[in-house]
Image (tube, helix red, strand yellow):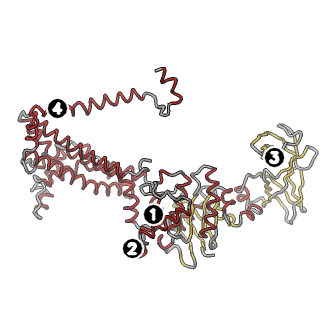
Amino acid sequence: MSLAVTSAPRRRNARLLPGFQLSLGFTVIYLSLIVLIPLTALILRPWELGVAGVWDVVTSPRVLAALKLSFGASAIAAAINAVMGLIVAWVLVRMQFPGRRLLDALIDLPFALPTAVAGIALTALYAPNGPIGLWLAEFGIRAAYSPLGVVIALTFVGFPFVVRAVQPVLEDLDSGLEEAAFTLGANSWQRTWMVVLPAIRPALITGVSLAFARAVGEYGSVIFIAGNLPLRTEIAPLLIVVRLEEYDYAGAAAVGLAMLSLSFLILLAVNGFQRLMATPGAGR
Amino acid sequence: MPLIIKNISKTYGQSQALHNLDLEVGDREFLALLGPSGSGKTTLLRILAGLISPTTGDVSFDGADLLSLSARERRAGMVFQHYALFRHMTVAANIGFGLRVRPRRDRPSAEEIKRRTDELLRLVQLEGYGARYPSQLSGGQRQRVAQARALAIEPRMLLLDEPFGALDAKVRRELRYWLRRLHDETGVTTIFVTHDQEEAMDLADRVAILNGGKIEQVGAPNDIYASPATPFVFDFLGAANEARGLVRDGELHVYDARFPLPGDGSGEVKAFFRPHEVEINPADGRGFMAEVVGVIARGPATRLECRRGDQVMEIDWARGRLPDGVTRGAQVRLAPERFTVFPAGT
């Protein structure tokens, strides 16, 4: 310690904020309790089946189908939310109209609603005898009890993430940027594509990843609308519950581990992409 | 005069930013719009850039109606106060932006854009910086990138909105002379908005002084300084002392002293004089009596605060040592070397 004190004036990275060690320690312990320890338990649990056993569970047709549906539908929902969320954020920030505040408040409702309630409401609407379901049926489209229903539910629960991630960044965007592009002769499409979107891209990617991650883990709203037919409309989180109800804890953990690994890889890839696209100035 | 601004007004709801303003700008001229904040100078610049439309009035450029032209047809290169550089683009991409967004038939080839970008980088003395991002540049360098970006569209006029406002004093001064040389080199008609009178006087061919949405005076810097048209102009161009006076028989009566004042006219006036144009005399000398209430040494000059009645005047003494007896509390006589008078009602 005395050495540290005597050399302190020359230390180049002297920390100005007090309590660094305390706060770091707190952060690590908190993260461990909340995230790492439960996840470690999940990672360790399935191996009582043996490596081959885990592999068998994960590659069984029913699990593969469930994983494919969960991640596929989540990706589609995230893509829909990317476009629609961006448009809604744009309208909320850039346009003045009566009821704007009300609309703004409505955005968060998917967060507040118990997902089961959302699921039941969506099912009532999209069921073959529901108001929207009847209309869709005329075109031969079946929404409820089909993969489309899963996408609808996941889009619903992920929607606020994109809007809330993009909105503040769009609000803070220097209006001078668009004005500069305007005086340089850029038309409104060029101003949007070449100036505004690149500026909000990091926020958009963050919002979309959050919406995606939320959708992958979503359970409550989907099980009502999906119909839950194994191999067809059964999502991975539901399959885990099914396994638990069969007292197959290791099997449930194996499916969970597969979801965890896939999610981790995808979020890691998104992060890497963000870093790749980030310009040196993006953070400032 | 290629740029003729006629009877321009701009109203925002209740408040009027510009009042029936007329202004003409010559070819290749460097004109400074000088005024305090809220005087309407930036509003005028934004009207010329096409960012806002005036409530009434006309602007013509080379005989054509400027207001009916789109931004692309106007070719008004604008430099913003905070530069508004595109952070996600390299310096070269920023500069080439105005060329890349042209419709396909007018768009130069990629090689041509690169050639022009390199040329502009040379012009603003940023050769080799093309691959950097704006955040990797200093404030002065960013300013020059903004300048190059505006020049890339081969502007018919260059509009600069407080271009040095975000820079520190030393860089400001360096860039000021650089900008003047750049203008002499490129010859683009330039309108420059600033609230810094020193900057305007240093740089511009002519200065237009705005106050409350109206032009108070337009003219060459020296002419304006030598014969300001209104008290506002006198006050805005530098530190000023004001005294009430009376003109009679070719003499200006100020307090208990009389000064010769060539020219006719008589009556009550506001008499202004500059702090550095004052002679300090002993109590039995020439000038009006005042009491020294403060002596502040500030670099090359000494600032005296003198009181006469309820009026406190500032005197800058830059001629070496103060005369004997001039200390706090002393009674002295002040004899301004030059007065500028305006009728009392103005």
Q: Residues within 10 Å of mark 1 (few under 14, many from 20)?
A: many
Q: CA distance from mark 2 to mark 4?
A: 60 Å
- Of labels 3 and 2, earlier in sequence is 2
Q: CA distance from mark 1 to mark 4?
A: 55 Å
- Most extreme residue toward the bottom is B63
Q: CA distance from mark 3 to mark 2?
A: 65 Å
Q: Please name the residue that numbered disc 3 is placed on.
A: B317
- Of labels 1 and 4, earlier in sequence is 4
In this picture, is A65 found above or below A24? below
Mark 2 and mark 1 residues within 8 Å of each other at the beta carbon: no
Q: Position of residue B107 (x, y in %)?
A: 42, 72
Looking at the picture, tell me which residue is in the foreground, B284 or A70: A70
Mark 3 and mark 2 residues within 8 Å of each other at the beta carbon: no
| Viewport quadrant of the C terminus of chain B | bottom right
Q: CA distance from mark 2 to mark 1?
A: 17 Å
Q: Residues within 10 Å of mark 3 (few under 14, many from 20)?
A: many
Q: Position of residue A221 (x, y in %)?
A: 17, 45
Q: Residues within 10 Å of mark 2 (few under 14, many from 20)?
A: few
Q: Secondary structure at mark 3?
A: strand
Are the residues flagged by discs 1 and 4 from a single subunit?
yes
The type of residue carrying mark 1 is: Ala
Q: Please name the residue that numbered disc 4 is placed on.
A: A44
Residue located at (60% from left, 74% from top): B4
- Residue A91: quarter of image: bottom left
Q: Please name the residue that numbered disc 1 is placed on.
A: A181
Q: Please name the residue that numbered disc 2 is placed on.
A: B104
The type of residue carrying mark 3 is: Trp
Chain that bears disc 2: B
Q: Position of residue B110 (x, y in %)?
A: 41, 68
